[in-house]
Amino acid sequence: MKIAVINYGAGNLPNAVRALQAVGADLFVTERPEDLAQAEAVVLPGVGATADTMQSLQQMGMAAVLPDLVASGCPFLGICVGMQVLLATSTEFGDHACLGVVGGAVQRLPDEAGKIPQIGWNQVHYRPAFAAHPLFAGIPDGTDFYFVHSYYCAVDDPAVVAGQTDYGLSFPSVLIRNNLVAVQFHPEKSGRYGLQLLRNFVNFASHSRGISGTELDPGRAGPPATPSNS
């Protein structure tokens, strides 16, 4: 299965590519929207601000095609700012529009959270409805993942929130809706369980490809992946 990793100049691209390759992903890196037609799954990694990311995606022509690609049922993984740009709007450095794939707004973490940005390890707790989802296979509830962010996704529909993390408030750290997966943390920097999550996404994508977004059910996404010792 071919996975396209979108290159829009994000600094963590090499780390994300190496991590995906480490779990056996057959991938290619692209800056061209037309190349996504060859992909059976797509990964949008990233660090930085939503405004800068959206500007890059718009200049590349990616912003025009990604919403339709997700709607088509293509398995999609957004990482960090790659998750945030999926929302409708962002308040980071002024109000601006994002991709609008998921309703909601990107908002700043509250000052009472402590040090902002949040940099370091924090727990992800699964919502009960998603505890058995293939994305979490072999990963205990409450596992620590590595975060680097000042903003979070305030989504309109709580039903898409698969995992939550506490930092001044309880914010969505994992979103899942049919073929769409997005995480606020960096799995490529999260050690054994970060690699396991990427492996699970590849497994999930390989079993869900070809099932439309309206038909896809987590229970049809294939068997759990085997936990990694890496």
Image: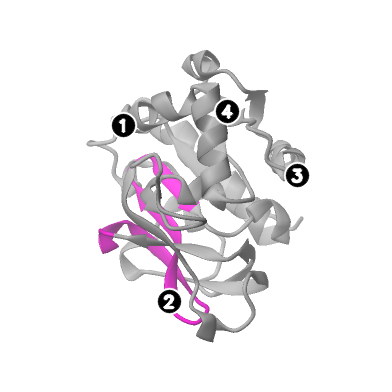
Q: Name the residue under label 1.
A: 71
Return the disc, 2 or 3, that comes first in the chain's sequence: 3
Residue at horizontal 36 percent and vertical 25 percent from the top: 210
Residue 79 appearing in the image = no
Mark sitting on residue 15: 3
Label 3 amino acid? Answer: Asn
Q: Indicate left or right for 33 with 198 as reference.
A: left
Work out whether 205 lies above or below 140: above
Q: Indicate left or right for 40 with 198 as reference.
A: left
Circle 4 — which element?
strand
Q: Quadrant of the C terminus?
A: bottom right
Q: Given this view, does label 4 or label 1 mark the residue nearer the observer?
A: 1
Residue range in magenta is 156-182
Q: Which of 205 and 36 is in front in this view?
A: 36
Q: Indicate left or right for 24 with 81 as reference.
A: right
Return the disc, 4 or 3, that comes first in the chain's sequence: 4
Circle 1 — which element?
helix
Separation of disc 3 and disc 1 at Cα?
28 Å
Q: Which of 186 and 97 is in front in this view?
A: 97
Q: Mark 4 points at which residue?
A: 3
